[in-house]
Image: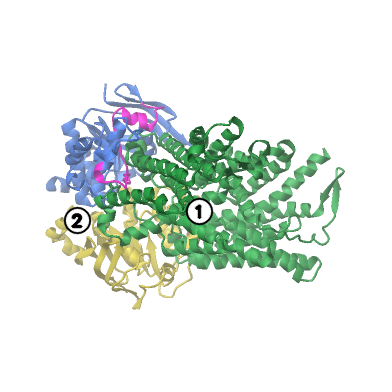
Amino acid sequence: MGFYLAQFLTGLASASSLFLVASGLSIIFGVTRIVNFAHGSFFMLGAYLAYTFVNILPHGVLGFWGAIIVASLLVGVIGVFLEITLFRRIYKAPELFQLVATFGVVLVIQDLALWIWGAEDLFGPRAPGLGGAVRILGEPIPQYDLLLIVLGPAVLLAVWLLFNKTRWGTLVRAATQDREMVSALGVNQSWLFTSVFFVGSTLAGLGGAIQLPREAANLLMDLNVIGEAFVVVVIGGMGSVPGAFLASVLIGELNAFGILIFPEITLVLAFLVMAVVLVVRPWGLLGKPDAVLRGADGPPEQPLKPFTATSKYLVWALAAALLATPAIADEFVLVLLSDILIFTLFAVSLHFIMGPGGLVSFGHAAYFGLGAYGAALAVKYLGVDMISGLVVAPIAAGLGALVFGWFCVRLSGVYLAMLTLAAAQITWSVAFQWQDVTGGDDGILGIWPAEWASEKMAYYYLTLALVGASVYVIRRIVYAPFGYALRAGRDSQLRVEAIGINLKSQQWMAFVITGIFAGIAGGLYVYSKGSIFPDELHIARSVDGLIMVLLGGIQSLIGPIVGAVSFTMLEDLVTRLDYWRIIFGGVILFIVVIAPEGLAGFARKILPESLTGKKNEGVQI
Amino acid sequence: MSLLDVTNLCKSFGGVRAVNDVNFSLEKGEMLALIGPNGAGKTTCFNMLNGQLKADRGSVSFQGQELLGMNPRDIWRLGIGRTFQITATFASMTVRENVQMALISHHRKVFSLWNRATNSYAQEANSLLQQVGMEHQADRACGVLAYGDLKRLELAIALAHGPQLLLMDEPTAGMAPQERITLMELVASIAKSSNVSVLFTEHDMDVVFAHSDRLMVLNRGEIIATGTADEIRSNEVVKEVYLGGGSTFDTGEKEKTSA
Amino acid sequence: MLEVQGINAFYGQAKILDDVSFSVGAGEVVALLGRNGAGKSTTMKTMMGMVSSTKGDVTFNGETIKKLPSHVICQKGLGYVPEERRIFTELTVMENLEVGKQDKRPDAPFWTPDKLFKLFPNLAEMRNRPGGQMSGGEQQMLSIARTLMGNPSAILLDEPSEGIAPVIVEQMAFTIMELKKEGLAVLLSEQNLHFAKLVSDRAVIVEKGSIRYQGTVKELEENPEIRDAYLAV
């Protein structure tokens, strides 16, 4: 009995820390509509800064808590700095942009933290006076945990009062719904937003700082906590602070007891709960249906046009060049080109669901990874040949998409995006934790192509053929009635339902199609590398895809190809350097601020009409 | 049997009767206007007819087929077209493609993965556009159309599957007076020539009085009056709850002189 | 007191406003007439600093307000009641009014919730009701009341009668006459000519982003050609 109580209290204590991060994320999302990946970085900075200040300030109760408070406030100030320099510029940008931009911040902060604090884990001191344990029903409960258990509800109350009983809170809630109107009523809304960012990031900083006595500050904290915080915010309902509290307790307890019952799949549990909650309550436990945001959408996409004659020649010329390359290129170039081709297919398949489909997928790595793991497992356990492996890959990914898609199409907007992310995290956790089957962190090795394709040149041609055919088929689908119906559903859900189209089944099928093609890319990838690791399923891989689509521009079908090519080449160049993340993050931020329509969109603006087939028709009033 | 028979239709939201025991029928080729103050239950009523909202009680029979319990897609397939208060069209497609989309759906080809959508049913789409006078703009992007043209495009989309009944929710909302009249004249002429019935809600009394065969006034979820334009205009109860003193729309005398 | 001089506005490449000029005096009601998309809303948004104009000027009490952000323009005493009301549906009536609250201004009537409830008796009965649970007419009242909480000396009303029952529109006309009596300058954008005639002193007709006619409402009535060309009732 006592043991279960202790486990329960541990769960509550973790819930408090999680709640602080998640409530901050939820507040910022509620007002700015930005899904802030960098929120996890705020949490990490809170822990590191607390570590630094605990060592600077005099030891003792005052020094310890002083360090915690200074660290949290400093994180708040960093949040304000980022809001003013970056986020302010992208409030009106599409979700995808914001997401990628915040991921750029994650990369930059990761390298800054590495540079300032080094790669070693930093252990903080215990809280002075709270280092001991209290015995409850015979079980030792750390005093610090008891403090945390009280802290969570206290912060909930404070935040609730702040939002519901002050003029500031009223203004913030009004701005959540209609910022332009709030401004027209005489409220300086940019400072209002900045103050919201301050509150949100301070909470994240506090969450990280108070975690220090329980967990060493480390460089993986950011993405680890952001995954859980997303889950909490989504389960609770985006923008709802009480919801975040409820969900934190749920997840905290789930982790505390889950580890007793299913130690193998603890990571999956949280995401499974999230999927179930969302299907039953599509807006989370205490959330409200997504209000349509005003003034956030750009001009509509242009109608699709067939290739112009010039474009057709260019496509043939490109194909000829790709076919001729092996004659002049060495093996190194061929491997790089194969990589580029594989990621092109990955990006094109992601673009298919995001552009024409209008469904923002944050977890496209799931299908890439399912394809790769599908083929690898088939080789490892069934000993199949390469052709069969390459057939298994899209089937595995397609089946995954069939299952995940069924859940996803029930949702829309940010909730859908979060569920796709959860789906990817589930597959990642399985690959990572189910060591007996997947090899866990060690991955699966020795997946080599068949004899006839083992030469780099042969494998390059195989890749070229499969990727070329796939891209062509995707393009046909986009121009076919199916693709049109999909775009129609994106443009006006109301209208497609009113002309008898079952949008959900269109979208479900779109998920399967995109899954199949991402699976082909995954299959090609595993044979080209000879191995597969869980990393290929991680958030970072999904974000890679998003960056490619963003680089190329979401509104153009050529976009993802341009994006994948430039991304893969840039990555190949940069990752050889130390501190490559900061460069990479910087490049992302630069692009988001300077060329928000993507490279292809940017080119379309400056290229002649003969290439783009565009007609500049302004909006007529 | 009428084309549409609504009997004892009821709907409550949290204890409040939004629509209370509504009964009416609609004949073939008839234009019936549903008017009333905001919150009277017009939209609720409409949404039950088109399947977006579940009714608590009652029956809606279309050519003898019960509509309650069916989803909007199946109701559409029975031959009921809709237009919306705020236009709902596909902004990233051309005008013709918008109509083709409805035709593709009508012919159940939305899962086709290979043929080009732009080549499907282009002739039919063109003749629909001609009906509403939009054939010259067929290749323009829908996103750049003027509002009045969007409304006409929406009408063409609604007519694509040859419906017998059009449900139009505030068809002239947001239009200039002259455009309102032109649009409703177009609707009326199509209704007469193809024998389509029209049920519409509307706030513009000028439009309502000029273009409906019959009017129904809804107040607090109940029908308080039914009749011709003249009967409704002179109905004391209607004046009190809805029309007011008549200073904000054309009174009968003026309209007769201008018509 | 409120003057617009030769402003223009673009949406992407399309010109929405072209050289628009007019003025509104204290205690005067001016109606901005024209069809949907003619540029009425854009004119008001440009005046409020929500849309930027590359040419011309907007002055208020002799001071240029063109390059100022919306909240500063509002703080100077120019109130804006938007199209489609834009009530904060999650907030109660009292909270909606709180958002609009600004300091007292020497040159304008001072409004409190109690004083507003006298002008809009319906609202008094629903102080704690969320905006989302009110009817369209009630929301329109609240939207006007919310803007008045900023104690404006001039007010822009964008299509206040759109989608509202005639009986409420009559009440709206009464409210506008009250504001006029208080000395407010009122700019009203309208499509309902009957309503506009009822309350306004002068009319400005906009068509395709340019002004086609300015004059008193009486002159407009006596000028059927203009009426039929741009309004055609």
Nearer to us in this view, A22 or A597: A597
* Residue A573 image offset from top left, x and y in percent: 51, 60
Q: Colour of chain B?
A: blue
Q: Magenta span covers which residues?
A: B67-96
| Residue C88 showing in the rendered view | no
The residue labelled by disc 1 is C91
The residue labelled by disc 2 is C231
Instruction: Look at the picture and state if C201 lies above or below C59.
Output: above
Q: Is C125 one of the magenta-colored residues?
A: no
| Residue C136 showing in the rendered view | yes
In the rendered view, how is the structure colored?
by chain
The crowd level at tag 2 (other Cα within 10 Å; few <14, some 14-19, many 20+) is: many
Q: Is residue A288 left or right of residue C233?
A: right
Amino acid beneath label 2: Leu
Q: Is B69 one of the magenta-colored residues?
A: yes
Amino acid beneath label 1: Leu
Which type of secondary structure does the marked residue at label 2 adopt?
helix
* Residue A15 image offset from top left, x and y in percent: 69, 49
Which type of secondary structure does the marked residue at label 1 adopt?
loop
Residue placed at 82% from the left, 37% from the top? A1
Q: Colour of chain C?
A: yellow
Residue placed at 24% from the left, 62% from the top? C209
Q: Quarter of the image for the C terminus of chain A: give it.
A: bottom left
Marked residue chain, label 2: C
Q: Which mark is residue A105?
A: none
Q: Quadrant of residue C27?
A: bottom left
Residue placed at 35% from the left, 35% from the top? B113
Q: Colour of chain A?
A: green
Nearer to us in this view, A544 or A317: A317
Q: Quadrant of residue C54?
A: bottom left
Share a chain, discs 2 and 1? yes
Q: CA distance from mark 2 to mark 1?
A: 38 Å
